[in-house]
Amino acid sequence: MVCKTKKQRGIMPGTHRLTGLACALTLGMALNANAAQPAADGPRQYLIIDYAQTRNVRSQNDERTIDTRVSLSAGELSFVMYERVLGARTPTVQEHDYRSPFIHLTAVQQTTLTTALMQAGFDHLTSDQTFDGRETVRFSFLDPGHNYSYAFGHAVADDATRTAVVKALFDFVAQMGLDTSATGTATTSEGDTAAARPVTIAKLVAHPDLYDGKRVSVAGYYHTEFEASDLCDRKPQLGLPAGSLTCLWQGEASTFADPSALTGRNDSWERIEGVFVKGPNGHMGLYPGQIDRVTRSETVPALQ
């Protein structure tokens, strides 16, 4: 196998998130010179896979993202698929989360996967010089005497070779039974058309289980900036005692929300309607709860 070093500016290695039917694939492979051929004591190869695909699915009554992830590290393979509802017109809606147990791959099984990826054209993928941000891929091949690596972006989501490589990966996952053995959980919440219950931030934080998944109407001081989307029970200001400010994370608007109903402004008091999700959540899991699928935001007088 011959690999060439290629570098391309403007790519962030390790970026996996995509939209539509595009997907991102990050594989790092440490192979000996005869990785595809098992030695007497098993092949001396190390294979790492980190695959992620994100796609949007929209129907007349709801829209959601579906994230699929496959990872292999230290010989441990796992499969994850989870949903996030972006908007729902039905009275209630469910989100599913499937996670397979980790299974340990033998050296022979890792070689089988490596061979399948190579036969699909893994080592013949080409760079696309018109990187458009929809996909990034990073490969590394290491052996005792060489170190080859390159990174590139695919501007064409349905690239035939990339599609074949991804299919080979998922065929292997299916053969190992991971996509069918994943244990699933379902979370039910109210749809965007359910009546919103008036409630305070203090009550949501004090009784998260009571309101989890319910539509609520809550007022607070809203401030957003990089890595912040705070709806607080009072206006942040210098001199407030530590711990005296209680904030929720304000999530995104429902994809079915009427834009004319979203009139709230940054750095102002507002009332919003949306679905409460108990924490920890928000940025880095630092918030006791968040309001998702917002359908209304309007400025209101300051709370007393």
Image: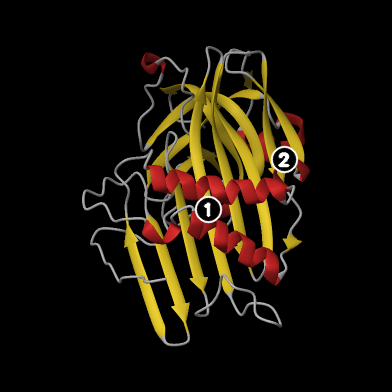
**Secondary structure beneath label 1:** strand
Going by the numbered disc 2, the residue's amino acid type is Ala
Residue 37 pos. (x, y %): 59, 73
**Secondary structure beneath label 2:** helix
Can residue 167 be seen in the rendering of this structure?
A: yes
Q: Is residue 224 left or right of residue 7?
A: right
* Residue 246 quadrant: top right
The vertical placement of 61 against 16, above or below, is above
Q: Nearer the viewer, residue 189 or 103?
A: 103
Residue at x-position 57% and y-position 17%: 192
Q: Nearer the viewer, residue 246 or 244?
A: 246
Q: Nearer the viewer, residue 191 or 39?
A: 39
Nearest-to-viewer mark from 2 and 1: 1
Residue 161 pos. (x, y %): 40, 48
**Mark 2 Cα shell of 10 Å, populated few (<14), some (14-19), many (≥20):** few
Q: Is residue 261 left or right of residue 68?
A: left
Q: Nearer the viewer, residue 220 or 289?
A: 289
Residue occupied by mark 1: 51
Going by the numbered disc 1, the residue's amino acid type is Tyr
The disc label shown at residue 89, or none: none
Q: Return the disc, 2 or 1, that comes first in the chain's sequence.
A: 1
Q: Quadrant of the N terminus?
A: bottom left
* Residue 78 quadrant: bottom right
The vertical placement of 165 against 77, above or below, is above
Residue 98 pos. (x, y %): 70, 42
Can residue 245 be seen in the rendering of this structure?
A: no
Residue at x-position 61% and y-position 80%: 44
**Number of on-image labels:** 2
Distance CA(mark 2)–CA(mark 1) = 39 Å
Residue occupied by mark 2: 206
Q: Is residue 74 left or right of residue 161?
A: right
